[in-house]
Amino acid sequence: MDDFDFKNKTALVRVDFNSNINPQTKKILEAPRIRAHGETTIKELVRKGAKVVILAHQGRPGDPDFAPLKQHAEFLSKVLGKPVQYVDDLFGEKAQKAIKQLKSGDVLVLENVRTYPDELKKGTPEEHAKSEFVRKLAPLADVFVNDAFSAAHRAQISIVGFTAVLPSVAGRIMERELKALTKAVENPEKPCLYILGGAKADDALKISQYVLKNNIADQVLTGGVVGHLFLAAKGFDLGRSNMDFLQKKELMGFVPGIKSLIKEYPERIEMPLDVAVEVDKKRKEISVKQLPTEYSIFDIGANTIEKYSKIIKNAKSIVFSGPVGVFENKEFEAGTKKVFEAIASSKAYSLIGGGDTVSAAEKFGMAQKMGYVSTAGGALIEFLMGEKLPGVVALEKAAART
């Protein structure tokens, strides 16, 4: 954004306004992403005299949270402290007329990009540039600003299509995310630690493989359902209810890959030494040597917390994705809370990401004590796996043309 003069120019800005919506009332419950984009990229564009046209999505067609963007525009208006226009049209006559009438510093929110049936199709920038969506809007704009890092893993029209035909730049959120992630992934200070929890064990396996094989991480610490699966791969019988849960979630298919990884890097992968189970709605801790158990496992135990905290204390870089227990339940919040406390008291550069991890950080008042909090979900995971993100690649290609 530093390289473009936005004064009196029409900027098409792709943001991620996707927010939590009450399925009954269709009202926005919380909107941290609207606030983040508004306070950075959009506010700067307004200050620089651009005519700002917002492209965003909310939910998917058929889902309970699929909704128009009228209330998103109202929320953005409060963030900016100025009126924000909204039009219930994406690229038709109403939208085109509203864009043409914009003055310097005006902000217009167009309709949900996913009301256009072809938006969810994957394609190259050149293929998408031929769509009616791009052909109708691109001639009305002077520049495309992609600020939606959290959607950059999708090769969709509103993410990559405009980069083929317009000067294109990264917005401040996109820029901030890429800088923070590059620091944590491409050249981390050593020792570098990855803490992987939550329930997405397929992601955890791919991330572990990538960061261990490329010597990005010195150690990987596991917890949550990921920890359960790694224990199962090591040969532990977790008990019928826990093993049934892994089967039901179709996670046992990842056991062979995890086994190979443990065999290849036995000293660099840490698994729980003890776990917390639920007995009569209360927490009870048992050593993994006491497995199997008839009770459900909901957290890591005190010995694991102590061991992980010591490892964290000596780290220089930490990536934390996925809670290590059911932190929403007070009986089982200790593992995740103590891991956050250990990260906060360490001298390491820390990056946390993923919806549940960020929610946990906010619950425990730890978000401000982390080095960087990523708002991305799927894009973050793919970046941690070493994947190229279509939205970022499209911006790089557009920059190479200028």
Image: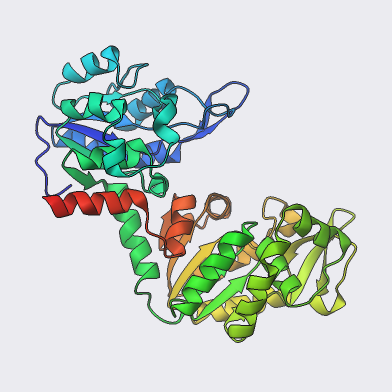
From the viewer's perspective, is residue 59 above or below residue 315?
Answer: above
Image point (59%, 27%), residue name: 64
For the point 22% across and 42% down, the residue is 164
Q: Relative to residue 220, is residue 43 depicted above or below?
A: above
Observer-nearest of 260 and 234: 260
x, y percent for residue 32:
44, 40
> Is residue 77 visible to the viewer in this orientation of the structure?
yes
Q: How many marks?
A: 0
- Which quadrant would residue 341 be assigned to in this image? bottom right
Residue 39 in sight = no
Task: Name the residue rendered at 45%, 56% in the picture.
Answer: 380
- At which x and y percent is residue 65? 55, 29
Residue in the foreground of this view, choosing between 201 and 78 = 201
Residue 87 shown left or right of residue 48 in the figure? right
Image check: 327 left or right of 239?
left
Q: Is residue 299 left or right of residue 68?
A: right
Percent x, y for residue 294? 90, 63
The colour style of the image is rainbow
48 or 62, which lies in front? 62
Can you give x and y, in whole percent of width and height, for residue 160 in the image?
31, 42
* Side of 117 where 50 appears, left or right: left
- Residue drawn at 70 percent across, 55 percent down: 326
